[in-house]
Amino acid sequence: MSEHTTALVTGANKGIGYEIAAGLGALGWSVGVGARDDRRREAAVEKLRAAGVDAFGVPLDVTDDASATAAARLIEEQAGRLDVLVNNAAITGGVPQEPTRVDPAVVRTVVETNVIGVIRVTNAMLPLLRRSASPRIVNMSSSVGSLTRQSGPGGEQTTGPVSAAYAPSKTFLNAVTLQYARELSGTNILINACCPGFVATDLNGFRGVRTPEQGAAIAVGLATLPDDGPTGKFFEDAGEVPW
Ligand SMILES: NC(=O)c1ccc[n+]([C@@H]2O[C@H](COP(=O)([O-])OP(=O)(O)OC[C@H]3O[C@@H](n4cnc5c(N)ncnc54)[C@H](OP(=O)(O)O)[C@@H]3O)[C@@H](O)[C@H]2O)c1
C-alpha cells in the first residue's frame, strides 16, 4: 500500500477541478486526475507533472457505472487505498432552465451527472476510502443550491437565474451529502459540501469574477480537515452556507 496520501479529483482536466488537483499536489500528495476524455486528461496530467505534481490519469465518466468501477480498480492497483475524494465534475445543462420551459430531459441529464454521478463515484471509492486513516470526501456544490439564500431577499442577485436543473441539482447534492454524513457518523470519514464562489470557467462562459485557483481553495481546505473537523456541512470561503 502506498505511503503517500492519495486523492482523486473528478472533472480535473480543467477549471476548478484542475486547480484542486494542483493544490493537493502541492502538498506532496499523489493525485488522480479523473477525466472522461483521454486527450484532455493526458494534457492535464502532463501539465501537472511539469509543475512537479505526482499526478496520474484516471479515466472516469461519472455517469457510467463501469467507468466508476474501473476507476476504483485503477486506484487500488496504483495506491491500494484512497485518502481523499473530491467530487467536482458537473454540468449546467445549458438554457433555457426556467421550470415552465425546461426540457425534462435536461433536468434528468443534469441530475445524472451532478447528483447520481457523485453517489456512483463515492460508492465505488468507499471501500478504498475505508482503508485510509483519515478519509475525506468533498462535494463541490454551489451556493445557488441554498434554499435559504434563494428564498431570502435579493435571491436572484445572490443565487443566479431561475433554474429547474442546475440549482436544484446542487440542492439535491447538499441533501445527499448530509445523508452520507448521517450514515457515516461514527466512522472516521468526514464529508462536506462547498461552494467555490463565482469563478471564471467554461461552466459560465468565463463570466465569473474569481480565478479557478481561488475557487479551489475551499475544497483543498476541506480535503485537509483534521480528524476532529466538521462533517455534513456546507462551506464557502467566508464560512458556513445555510442549506
Ligand atoms: N464556475 C463557477 O462559478 C462555479 C460556481 C459554483 C460551483 N461550481 C462548481 O464547481 C465545479 C467545477 O466547475 P467549473 O466551473 O470548474 O466547470 P468546468 O470548467 O466546466 O469543469 C467541469 C469539469 O467537469 C467535467 N465533467 C462534466 N461531466 C462529466 C462527466 N460525466 N464525467 C466526468 N467529468 C465530467 C468536465 O469534463 P469535460 O472537459 O470532459 O467536459 C470538466 O472537467 C462544478 O461542480 C460546478 O458546479 C462552479
Image (cartoon, helix red, strand yellow):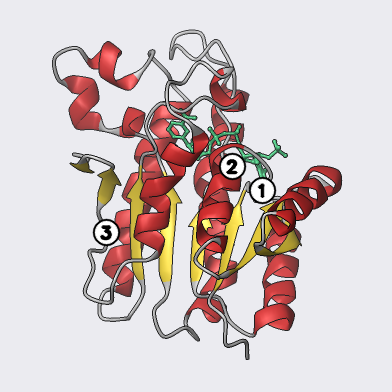
State ligand 1's quadrant: top right
Give, as a three-letter code, the residue at label 2.
Thr
Q: Classify 10 Å Cα crowding around label 2: few (below 14), some (14-19), many (20 and above).
A: many
Residue closest to the eye, 18 or 92? 18
Disc 2 residue lies near ligand 1 with CB under 8 A:
yes
Q: Residue 124, how many percent across, how many down?
A: 60, 69
Q: Classify 10 Å Cα crowding around label 1: few (below 14), some (14-19), many (20 and above).
A: many
Which residue occupies 46% across, 28% down?
Answer: 199
Does 202 appear above or below 70?
above
Which residue is the site of mark 2? Answer: 113
Q: Quadrant of the C terminus?
A: top left
Which residue is the site of mark 3? Answer: 232
Q: Residue 100, how many percent across, how many down?
A: 44, 9
**Nearest to viewer (mark 2 / mark 3):** 3
Quarter holding residue 134: bottom left
Which residue occupies 23% across, 68% down?
Answer: 229
Which residue is the site of mark 1? Answer: 63
Upstream in sequence: badge 1 or badge 2 = 1
**Nearest to viewer (mark 3 / mark 1):** 3
Does 217 appear above or below 223?
above
Residue closest to the eye, 38 or 173? 38
Does 45 appear above or below 79?
above
Q: Residue 122, how many percent across, how many down?
A: 52, 63
Give, as a three-letter code, the residue at label 3.
Gly
Q: How far apart are labels 1 and 2 at the CA level?
A: 6 Å
Quarter holding residue 233: bottom left
